[in-house]
Image: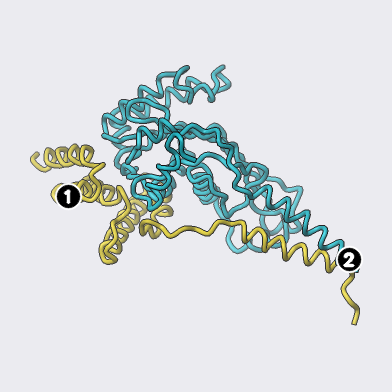
Chain colours: A yellow, B cyan
């Protein structure tokens, strides 16, 4: 059997070690603070075609799933996501459910209090019409 | 024997080169004092300073890295709609158009608040509107795809090599108008072609331009916000960078803050 030539051996070694070095240099992803599921993909699809009703509904469903899964696991849902889902409800005319979500966001994240109070006032005004 | 010596020598050179390019040496010249003093807990993402399609792709990817950096991120979809209603998107667009390079403006000036107070004023107003502690502006100066069919063993039938050029400015302004952090990077990103393995890998799924844009945006965010090398290939542009400081919901918050205090490391 013919032995591999020295250049071939060296090349193979270089390739293997390059892969190893590159792999080692990649910083390992630290554990995530929040559960995101497919948020980015759905957000992208919804933003890509804002008039596509199906895509908006899928984003809303994803937000709800993230909130529910986070709750089940006893983790905080990602910042802003309860409010985003509340905003979907607001746009659909479900003002009282929307108010519940805006209030929950403000409780979970005190940083959102002013903005959420503003959204609650808007939803109350719409509901009172 | 000669072959082994040659291989070891090549490996040594390779390891040295890899060590240099992937190293995490940071020049200690960035002044984080205003950032530490402002100590923002929350971030509002301002309307994008960019062409609309890139803005949309970008907005989809910005909340997650900011939240994972430890900040409260004002709900993106809700606030962007609110800012459209309040006329801020239009104002951002006007600011953007006013400084297009072809019209004699410089984008570097655009993020220099001493030369163009418009951005700073807008940040103060946006922070007031939402009670955010800080406002993040992202300016996309260039976002260009270019097909390179000259390379790639199977470029005709698998996946043509594409070069992507992205030039971004990030500017974080505090609620009272202080510039807390800024980062600018031109990134070149190659996908497809270029090598046997990458072509086989890429052939599994031919991504649409929108998917590529989103993947790039995700990578660039990681590069800029965390100053971390990304998994995908970015050529000739890796830099140590100055990351955003970690926010209050991040486990490393106290340690990071202490380290950045004047007199700290």
Q: Position of residue A31 (x, y in %)?
A: 43, 60
Helix, strand or loop at mark 1: loop
Image position of B73 (left or right of B98): left
Badge 1: residue crowd in 10 Å (few <14, some 14–19, many ≥20): some
**Residue at screen point 62% across, 44% down:** B238
| Label drawn at residue B215 | none
Q: Chain of mark 1?
A: A
Q: Between residues B236 and B214, which one lies in front from this camera angle?
A: B236
- Residue A42 visible in the displayed image: yes
Q: Tell me the element at label 2.
A: helix
| Percent coordinates x, y for residue A70 in the rendering | 29, 61
Give residue B103's position: percent from left, percent from top.
55, 18
Residue B157 screen position, x and y as percent = 70, 58
10 Å neighbourhood of mark 2: few (<14), some, or many (≥20)? some
Displayed quadrant of residue B93:
top left
Disc 1 to disc 2, C-alpha distance: 74 Å
Can you tell which of label 1 and label 2 is closer to the viewer? 2
Please identify the quarter of the rendering in which residue B172 is found.
top left
Q: Chain of mark 2?
A: B
Q: Residue at x 23, y 49 (%)?
A: A105
* Residue A46 in view here: no
Per the image, the residue denoted by label 1 is A94
In this view, B160 is above or below B105:
below
Q: Nearer the viewer, residue B232 or B132?
A: B132
Of B23 and A125, the residue lying toward us: B23
Q: Which residue is mark 2?
A: B3
Q: Which image quadrant: the N terminus of chain B?
A: bottom right
Give the image quarter of residue B199: bottom right
Describe residue B188's horizontal placement relative to residue B87 as left or right.
right
Residue at the bottom extreme?
Answer: A1
């Amino acid at each position: 059997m013919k032995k591999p030539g020295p250049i071939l051996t060296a090349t193979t070694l270089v390739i293997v070690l390059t892969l190893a070095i590159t792999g080692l240099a990649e910083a390992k992803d630290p554990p995530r603070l929040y559960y995101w599921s497919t948020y980015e993909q759905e957000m992208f699809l919804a933003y890509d075609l804002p008039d596509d009703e199906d895509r908006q509904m899928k984003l809303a469903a994803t937000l709800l799933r993230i909130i529910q899964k986070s709750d089940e696991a006893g983790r905080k849902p990602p910042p802003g996501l309860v409010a985003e889902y509340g905003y979907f409800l607001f746009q659909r005319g479900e003002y009282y459910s929307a108010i519940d979500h805006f209030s929950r966001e403000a409780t979970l994240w005190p940083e959102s209090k002013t903005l959420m109070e503003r959204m609650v006032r808007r939803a109350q005004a719409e509901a009172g019409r | 024997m000669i072959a082994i010596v040659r291989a070891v020598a090549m490996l040594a050179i390779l390891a040295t080169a890899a060590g240099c390019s992937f190293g995490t040496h940071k020049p200690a010249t960035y002044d984080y004092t205003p950032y530490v003093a402002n100590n923002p807990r929350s971030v509002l993402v301002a309307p994008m300073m960019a062409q609309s399609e890139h803005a949309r792709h970008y907005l989809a990817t910005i909340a997650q890295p900011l939240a994972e950096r430890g900040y409260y991120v004002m709900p993106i979809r809700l606030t962007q709609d609110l800012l459209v209603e309040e006329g801020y998107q239009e104002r951002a667009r006007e600011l953007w158009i006013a400084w297009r390079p072809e019209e004699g403006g410089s984008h570097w000036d655009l993020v220099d608040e001493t030369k163009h107070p418009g951005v700073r004023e807008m940040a103060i107003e946006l922070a007031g509107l939402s009670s955010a502690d800080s406002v993040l502006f992202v300016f996309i100066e260039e976002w260009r795809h270019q097909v390179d069919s000259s390379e790639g063993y199977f470029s005709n039938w698998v996946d043509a090599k594409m070069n992507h050029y992205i030039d971004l400015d990030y500017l974080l302004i505090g609620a009272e108008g202080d510039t807390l952090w800024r980062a600018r990077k031109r990134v070149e990103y190659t996908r497809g072609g270029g090598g046997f393995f990458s072509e086989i890998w890429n052939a599994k799924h031919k991504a649409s331009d929108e998917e590529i844009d989103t993947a790039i945006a995700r990578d660039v965010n990681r590069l800029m916000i965390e100053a971390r090398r990304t998994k995908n290939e970015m050529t000739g542009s890796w830099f140590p960078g100055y990351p955003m400081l970690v926010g209050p919901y991040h486990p490393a918050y106290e340690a990071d803050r202490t380290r950045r205090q004047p007199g700290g490391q």
